[in-house]
Amino acid sequence: MSDGVEVRVTTNGPLTVKGPIRLVGSDGEAWADVPEGTVALCRCGRSKVRPFCDGSHREAGFDSAPTLEAQPYPW
């Protein structure tokens, strides 16, 4: 186990990011109000608080459980 950042792909849900993170917006500015600890980032695109997850994937029926074998790197 590393003391660095861990990004986990959850089954049919968000990306969870655990560790010290710095979230930078599309304008290049760092967000000052990112909670410490674990942050859930939306993958389904339905969240009303993007980039954070609000659980909308459940109602939307988001279906994605990528694994290394099923989703090799595209590059």
Image (tube, rainbow, N blue to C red):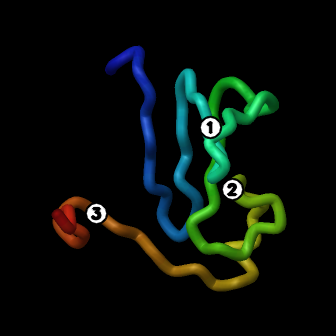
Disc ID at residue 43: none
The residue to which callout 3 is attached is: 67
How far apart are the alpha carbons under marks 1 and 3? 25 Å
Q: Going by the image, does 1 lie left or right of 43?
A: left
The answer to whether residue 15 is above or below residue 47 is above
Can the viewer see residue 22? yes
Q: Secondary structure at mark 3?
A: loop
N-terminal of the pair, mark 1 or mark 3, is 1
Residue at point 75% right, 64% down?
A: 55
Answer with the quarter of the image where residue 57 lies: bottom right
Q: Quadrant of the N terminus?
A: top left
Answer with the quarter of the image where residue 64 lies: bottom left
Q: Going by the image, does 11 lie left or right of 43?
A: left
How far apart are the alpha carbons under marks 2 and 3? 22 Å
Task: Check disc 2: other Cα within 10 Å, few if <14, some if 14-19, many if 20+.
Answer: some
Total tally of numbered discs in the picture: 3
| Amino acid of disc 2 | Pro
Answer with the quarter of the image where residue 50 lies: bottom right
Residue at the far top in the pictured view: 3
| Amino acid of disc 1 | Leu
Residue at point 44% right, 55% down?
A: 9
The picture places residue 32, in percent across and down from the top left corner, at 78, 28
Disc ID at residue 23: 1
Q: Secondary structure at mark 2?
A: loop
Residue at point 83% right, 67% down?
A: 48
Can the viewer see residue 72? no
| Amino acid of disc 3 | Thr
Discs 2, 1 touching: Cβ within 8 Å: yes
Q: Secondary structure at mark 1?
A: loop
N-terminal of the pair, mark 2 or mark 1, is 1
The residue to which callout 2 is attached is: 51
Task: Check disc 3: other Cα within 10 Å, few if <14, some if 14-19, many if 20+.
Answer: few
